Amino acid sequence: MKKNQSSKIVIEIKDLWESFRIYHHKSMTLKDTFVRLKKSAYEEFWALKGVSFKVFKGETLGIIGENGSGKSTLLKCISGILEPSKGCIKVKGKISPLLELGAGFHPELSGRENIFINGAILGLTKKQIQERYDKIVAFAELEDFIDTQVKFYSSGMYIRLGFAVAIFADPDILMVDEVLAVGDESFRKKCFDKIKEFQKMNKTIIIVTHDMGSAYRFCDRLVLLSKGKINKEGKPKEIVRNYVNSVIEDEKFSEKGSKDIVLTKVELFDENETKQTNFSPGDNLVISITYNAKTAIKNPIFGFAIFDQQGNHCFGTHTKYKGLNIPEVNGVGLIRFKLDSLPMLNGKFYLTVAAINESNDIYHELKNCLSFEVTSSNDDEGTLYIPVECEIQSLSNKSNTKQEVGKN
Amino acid sequence: MIAKLIEIYKHRELLVVFTKKELKVKYKNSAMGVLWSFINPLIMAVVYTLVFSKLFGASKEIKDYPIFLLSALLAWNFFTVCIATSSSAIIANANLIKKVRFPREIIPLSIILAALANYLMEVAVLMVILLIMGYNFIPYLPIFLLVLILQLIATAGFGFIFSALTVYFRDIEQLINIILLIWFFATPIVYDISKVNKLSPIFATALKILNPLVSIMLLYRSSLYYLSWPSLQLIIYGLLGSTSIFIAGYILFQKLSPNFAKEV
């Protein structure tokens, strides 16, 4: 997937600034304009503040960042939909904007007619579209509906047709904006395969995404935008980690509660009782929580929860579920949860710990207070770790071997 | 400016596709389809003839009032369709404007070309009627072609102006019908300009200078109805009027179109 970057620059962006007007009064009418001639009816909002970077031929660049960080504005500037307020952009080659697939489909017209219209919008001649027509229809899997008006299409069909036209427009630079998150699994796989094919053809690709997984898998280089500026630029591995951490520090970590019991320290240990934040699938792990109860608290419950990068709740439990009844705590103490055999395969996970009472009132909760990483040392795929043994048994009479092949 | 024109030329195929789309969408789902472009002017002609020639007695002064009327009315209808459609066109195509790069001029231009196709069909029918009624306009075809080109240039100019301004002032979409109504009576379509000339020659001249459509309608009439060569002065008025509107509209459109994607 990675290829030797020729130093040919295909996109060069120098000190790009882009502003929008935020209107305080939505209606833009003649009367408004004349009445508010003196007062400014809008505010200048800078979506991009001095962004500079280069894109080289054949590389796959990912642009990541939180909502409102300027990703889509940047893509629109590159594709020439928006004119920069300041700065300059140089682009060599034909760009296919994948900005929202199916842009420009006319609902009253059939799929066939829309292929020709959309193809022309993407810069294809009629002859070129005719040559690719069958491939486009086959890729979109719309053979039976191609003469149906697009307004009767399901949203999935709509997106498939849009992606198919865009991908067969044969651009030098392919731009993908969040589209990989849509469509069913098999179509997504097809799109990914097509993107890989583009990579093999040494085409330049720019992907804008929230999905760290695809950013990590596809991109040679990532640009992390935050509030209209480039926060970091570099290899996917470093950037993704950086991104996730910055999101955590900014947004995710929080604490709350009455603080009748305070959780003063949370630590993770491996089975050898050494502090650890990196684990392998199947490892044992100990969560150690130090508490301090200022007065005597009756029947407290201590618990923890594990979330993944996307914020999915992976697991959670507490002392009461586990049959540990604590009649009373007073002063400083230690709670230890021993976790046997981590069932995660890969990824970063966040730990939340809390002390509550029986009616779920929170004494103290530390949300996303710690993170740990699970890294698989073998090639297993997916999100869960399942210990697998495989064996082969020949059922013919020739030999009677029973062989264990793999175990991990 | 030249670079922009070259870019539009490079996208000529897109212009054709958009024009076809306009036409297809227009007649999709309507049972009578293209027939409407004949029924509409026919009914208008009947109504105006009844009102103006019978009620107001224009038939006494004007020979073959329906021919007199239609020779300008068809062109006016063509103009009206272009202006009304292009004033809402940019907003209607917001989806496209915000997502894809292409010369924005294509949108008003494709509307004009689609309407032109309709207009030519109507004119063809009118020409058959003219020949049947003994109006031999064939020697004056060059004038007809000239004025057709002038009208296209002027319409493109007005199309640029209204399509661009509506993005910033949404009221124009509502206002346009009133503007067109006043404009209709400020253009010699149902009446003869010579009548205005008799009442106030200065007013008639002012109308000719301020309203580029006056000279266009008069040129249409001289080629299809009066069957006479127009004065050079009239041709120059038409030429100057339409080119200056085109240039003004084009410049305005260039100024406003880069920000369409932010405003729609």
Image (spheres, rainbow, N blue to C red):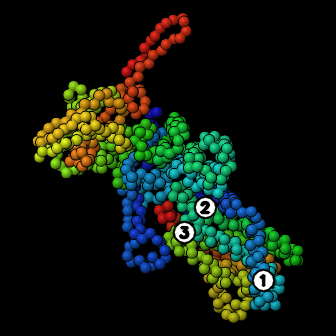
Residue drawn at (33%, 44%), measured in percent from left and top?
A243
Left or right relative to A55: residue B182: right
Q: Which residue does the numbered mark 3 point to in the structure image? A: B164
As drawn, the label of residue B106 is 2
Label located before the other in sequence (1 or 2): 1
- Where does residue B55 sit, x and y in percent of width and height? 77, 89
Q: Look at 67% across and 73% down and name the residue there.
A: B79
Residue B152 placement, left or right of A103 = right
* Most foreground residue, A3 or A385: A385
Quadrant of the drawing holding the C terminus of chain A: top left
Q: Position of residue A333 (x, y in %)?
A: 14, 38
Q: Which element is circle 3 on?
A: helix
Residue A191 or B204: which is nearer the viewer? Answer: A191
**Residue type marked 3:** Ala
In this view of the protein, which residue sits in the foreground, A47 or A185? A185
Specify whether disc 1 shares its chain with disc 2.
yes
Disc marking residue B204: none
> Picture coordinates of residue B254 (x, y %)?
53, 66
* Label 3 crowd bin: few (<14), some (14–19), many (20+), radius 10 Å: many
Q: Nearer the viewer, mark 1 or mark 3?
A: 1
Q: Is residue B21 left or right of residue A83?
A: right
**Side of B263 where A286 appears, left or right:** left
Between discs 3 and 2, the one toward the N terminus:
2
Q: Amino acid at mark 1?
A: Thr
